[in-house]
Image (cartoon, rainbow, N blue to C red):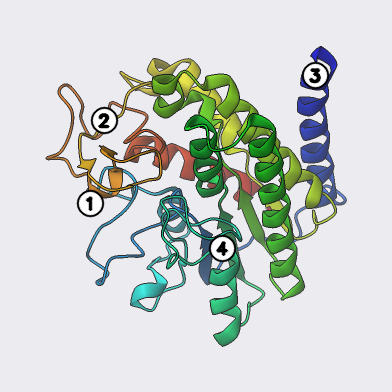
Amino acid sequence: MTRTWLRRPLLWAAAATALLLAACGGGEIESQLVPARMVVFGDASSDIGQTSTTAAARARYTINDATANIWTLQVATHYGLTLTTAAVGGTSYATGNARVVADPDAAGNTATPTVKEQIDTFLAGGTFAADDLVVVGAGTGDLVAELQAYVTGAQTSAQMLTNVAQAGRDLGAQVRRLVQAGAKQVVVMGPYNLGRSPWAIATSQTSAMELAAGRFNEELLVSIVDLGANVLYVDQALLLNLITAVPSGYGFANGTVAACNSVDPGPGIGTGTGQVNSSLCTSTTLASGATTTNHVFADRVYLGPVAQRLLGDWAFDKIHARW
């Protein structure tokens, strides 16, 4: 057992290192990318309000305020780009609760487009330009679905790990598909370590959720290790491990409890009925003592605005250094 636990992080690190070395080439950046647009695919972690019917509306999985409160918006802001959802004619296709290829979504909805279907929709009517920045932020939807089935006893730990490993490989296949379709700069962000989430803490499943997230990212990395010329992996798990280890070091008062109290009587984010759903959360639906800035997490799984902006800054720094 000890050898297995040691081998997995080493394999993950080796894959990430190989991808980085492939990306670096000769170690010189010939030109600095100034993207004309961002094209985004993914799940709730990257959703800027896909279910909203107007550009001004909000239904984001965070505290819905007037800031750049999703990490992809923060990256767009750094580049001076306007990012809007595909629902209003934009190029952000990421949709809350989406899974990579599996249906139904994390909350049991069969109408939510998977990441594959989001890419299908884009490719059916468009092509990639050389100066596009393509972003894929996914995996959390699959983890939520598989972990909820495990937590409720609907499947075993072994079944859960098999399924999340396959989902990681599936996401790698979609990244490869984007490169084959002509995407020159693809940023990939897998899920963070859900073992640090309020959900894991509340259900005493920190070890199982950490193992599941690690397995997903491990399989994703191994499946894209040869795509370094066009693909940059941004390690969200590393940043969130650092933030949740010492929240006060990043300006947070709380790193273990959700800021929102916007309870959803339905399936919400997929962690059970009657749970907080941050897509319903605003500055007027916060728990006692919580503000829009002092908690890492908005709900059981998804990040608050400040953590989202930190993640966006982290991603931008990696992108800017790479291209």
Q: Nearer the viewer, residue 92 or 143?
A: 143
The total number of labels drawn is 4
Q: Which residue carries the number 2 mark?
A: 259
Q: Position of residue 78 (x, y in %)?
A: 45, 53
Asked if disc 2 and disc 1 are in contact, CB closer than 8 Å, the reply is no
Above or below, comparing residue 175 to residue 238 in the picture: below
Q: Position of residue 290 (x, y in %)?
A: 20, 26
- Mark 4 to mark 1 CA distance (whole Å): 27 Å
- Mark 4 to mark 2 CA distance (whole Å): 28 Å
Q: Could you say whether the residue bearing mark 4 is in a helix, strand or loop?
A: helix
Which amino acid type corresponds to the residue marked 4 in the rendered image?
A: Val
Above or below, comparing residue 1 to residue 56 in the picture: above
Q: Position of residue 30 (x, y in %)?
A: 76, 60
Q: Which residue carries the number 3 mark?
A: 6
Q: Which of pointers 4 and 1 indicates the residue nearer the eye? A: 4
Residue at point 63%, 77% (across, down)? 128
Q: Which residue carries the number 4 mark?
A: 115
Q: Nearer the viewer, residue 40 or 38?
A: 40
Q: Residues within 10 Å of mark 3 (few under 14, many from 20)?
A: few
Residue at point 44%, 53% (across, down)? 97
Which amino acid type corresponds to the residue marked 1 in the rendered image?
A: Ala
The quadrant in which residue 317 appears is: top right
Which tag, 2 or 1, sits closer to the chain's start? Answer: 1
Residue 281 visible somewhere in the drawing: yes
Which amino acid type corresponds to the residue marked 2 in the rendered image?
A: Ala
Residue at point 40%, 35% (across, down)? 307
Q: Residues within 10 Å of mark 1 (few under 14, many from 20)?
A: few
The quadrant in which residue 4 appears is: top right
Above or below, comparing residue 256 to residue 127 in the picture: above
Which tag, 1 or 3, sits closer to the chain's start? Answer: 3
What quarter of the picture does the N terminus occupy?
top right
Circle number at residue 66: 1
